[in-house]
Image (cartoon, helix red, strand yellow):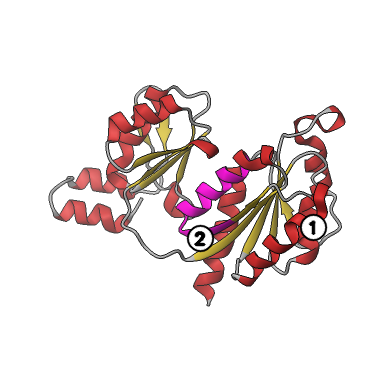
């Protein structure tokens, strides 16, 4: 919860003292309908916008969560969202809503525009890995990072990733995300050439022994290249958030 915003709302008489106390208390949990107990302080504690996992939730439930808490925050993300989620959210909250189709994410953003504070690079091994990479991009951009992407640059044609990688490093990225399925080797190769933290993002693209991304995950975890950390299979949200936190911390310390 943005304490300054709550205090300003109280000063203007938009909320009473009891509501202001509830909004500021760290142990306060907001009940929304019969389906959700919402933690209104999580975004401020973590430095990550509130991200609702849309899969398994009805469009009405997701719209209820956002409309019920939007008074205290300016940005929400919904991952694994469908066009029906988007339509329900737009009907509930109006302006500032967009659907990132490639990432399957809804973004509700009412913040004033500002200059990016960090830089993140994302490489994807194949075209099939792009949706997960795009999920990471949307999260990193929502956390006020400038994101550079290079897709379909896997090691099946080894030379494809070299130029994009060094262009990103020349632009001063603070971290790199490498999304790859199949054997997942791209993450280790990139890590061996980069002097910034690399986040391996295994995807569920694969078949046979690699079905579901298990080989890509194991290969990245088993990498002998220092500086490579790994998130779970298809966890674009986690990769994007981690990269942005690294980037923003780097920028604040300069």
Pick whichever, 210 or 18, lies toward us.
Answer: 210
What is the number of the mark on residue 159?
A: 1
Residue 61 falls left or right of residue 92? right
Q: Nearer the viewer, mark 2 or mark 1?
A: 1
Residue 224 falls left or right of residue 149? right
Residue at 73% x, 57% y: name it: 161
Q: Which residues are magenta?
A: 132-148
Q: Residue furthest bottom?
A: 254
Residue at 81% x, 50% y: name it: 157
Q: Earlier in the sequence, mark 2 or mark 1?
A: 2
Q: Quadrant of residue 18?
A: top left
**Relative to 31, residue 130 above or below:** below
Mark 1: secondary structure: helix
Residue 64: % across, % down:
34, 29
Q: Is residue 28 magenta?
A: no
**Relative to 203, residue 253 above or below:** below
Residue 194: % across, % down:
74, 66
Pick whichever, 59 or 185, lies toward us.
Answer: 185
Q: Quadrant of residue 128?
A: top right
Q: Residues within 10 Å of mark 1 (few under 14, many from 20)?
A: few
**Which residue position holds label 2?**
146
Mark 2: secondary structure: strand
Q: Residues within 10 Å of mark 2 (few under 14, many from 20)?
A: some
Residue at 17% x, 45% y: name it: 16
């Amino acid at each position: 919860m943005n304490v300054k915003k709550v205090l300003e709302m109280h000063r203007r008489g938009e909320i009473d003292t009891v509501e202001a106390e509830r909004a500021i208390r760290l142990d306060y949990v907001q009940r929304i309908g019969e389906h959700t107990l919402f933690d209104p302080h999580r975004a401020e504690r973590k430095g990550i916008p509130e991200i609702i996992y849309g899969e398994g939730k009805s469009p009405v439930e997701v719209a209820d969560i956002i409309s019920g808490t939007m008074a205290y925050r300016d940005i929400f993300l919904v991952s694994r969202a469908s066009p029906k989620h988007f339509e329900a959210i737009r009907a509930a909250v109006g302006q500032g809503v967009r659907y990132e189709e490639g990432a399957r994410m809804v973004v509700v953003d009412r913040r004033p525009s500002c200059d990016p504070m960090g830089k993140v690079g994302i490489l994807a091994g194949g075209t099939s890995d792009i949706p997960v990479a795009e999920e990471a991009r949307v999260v990193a951009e929502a956390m006020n990072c400038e994101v550079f992407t290079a897709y379909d640059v896997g090691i099946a044609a080894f030379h494809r990733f070299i130029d994009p990688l060094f262009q990103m490093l020349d632009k001063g990225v603070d971290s790199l995300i490498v999304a790859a399925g199949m054997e997942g080797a791209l993450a280790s190769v990139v890590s061996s050439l980069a002097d910034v933290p690399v986040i391996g993002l295994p995807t569920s693209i694969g078949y046979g022994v690699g079905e579901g991304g298990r080989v890509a995950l194991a290969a990245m975890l088993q990498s002998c290249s220092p500086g490579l950390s790994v998130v779970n299979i298809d966890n674009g949200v986690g990769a994007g958030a981690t990269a942005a936190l690294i980037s923003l911390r780097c920028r604040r310390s300069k």
